[in-house]
Amino acid sequence: MATDATAKFQNPNFRPVPQPTDFHPELTVSAHDGLHYWQFMVAGSIAGMVEHMAMYPVDTVKTQMQALGSCPIKSVGVRQALQSILKSEGIAGLYRGIGAIGLGAGPAHAVYFSVYEICKKSFSGGDLNDSVAHAASGVCATVASDAVFTPMDVVKQRLQLSNSPYKGVWDCVKRVLSEEGFGAFYASYRTTVLMNAPFTAVHFATYEAAKKGLMEISPESASDERLVVHATAGAAAGALAAACDNTA
């Protein structure tokens, strides 16, 4: 009976709707935004180097202010510190030690983003709503990347000081190794991880949630607006993480 009804209502004039040549219904959205791990490493490395080098003069001023700030009598403001550096060393003084950042920031950020993606896949099992997995992945990424970056950060800070006795990056590395031992490069590692871990946990949990929410608002244009989505989610995550970090 069912067969007869089906045949009765079939229209011989109907034709199947042709699908575009690039239509692939079996494809699914990648949990890693369509990128391979090596692409995360390269992108993260470039982003990290650009970020640190662009802000390096500000970091130099901050480092010298912190060194002077240990003695209240010598505490100075940003303008005074900047004027002091420019007067005694010129523009070059703002960039002393930047080579250490070039050596450390690239590998550290490559490790940072690749470890995060690997841990996110392992911890979440593909669940895009698992904020705990995203936060834990961020902590793991911080622990790994800080292990790579901390030695060069130590070298950078020593070279940034106005009375630095070192001639350059390699001179600093050799002298610290011979005079203080390898452990000197990791003297601040635990403190750095304790400071960065909460920030990263909040940052990535917020970033993943914001990214998912923004893409759900307009799923039909998600691919076209991917850069805007990432930028907006990243800005929201960074602001919230910074607020939580400063409150703590």
Image (cartoon, rainbow, N blue to C red):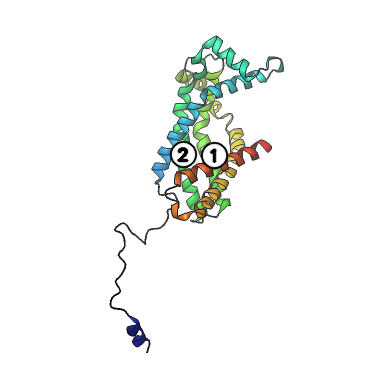
Vertical side of 183 occupied by 85: above or below: above
Instruction: Give the left or right position of residue 7, taking residue 206 as reference.
Output: left
Residue 36 in the image: state x and y as whole percent: 39, 46
Vertical side of 195 occupied by 102: above or below: above
Q: Quadrant of residue 193?
A: top right
The secondary element bearing badge 1 is classed as: helix
Residue 143, numbered label: 1
Q: Quadrant of the N terminus?
A: bottom left
Residue 56 in the image: state x and y as whole percent: 51, 24
Which badge, 1 or 2, comes first in the chain's sequence?
2
User: What's the residue at 41%, 58% (across, down)?
Assistant: 28
Identify the residue position indicated by label 2 in the image.
111
Residue type pointed to by label 1: Val
The Cα atoms of the two marked residues, 1 and 2, are separated by 10 Å
Vertical side of 231 occupied by 184: above or below: above
- How crowded is the residue under tag 1: few (<14 C-alpha within 10 Å), some, or many (20+)? many
Residue 39 in the image: state x and y as whole percent: 39, 42
Q: Quadrant of the C terminus?
A: top right
Q: Nearer the viewer, residue 205 or 156?
A: 205
Instruction: Give the left or right position of residue 245, taking residue 177 as reference.
Output: right
Instruction: Give the left or right position of residue 222, taking residue 205 as reference.
Output: left
Residue type pointed to by label 2: Val
For this orientation, the residue located farthest to the front is 13
Residue 152, numbered label: none
User: What's the residue at 50%, 29% (across, down)?
Assistant: 52
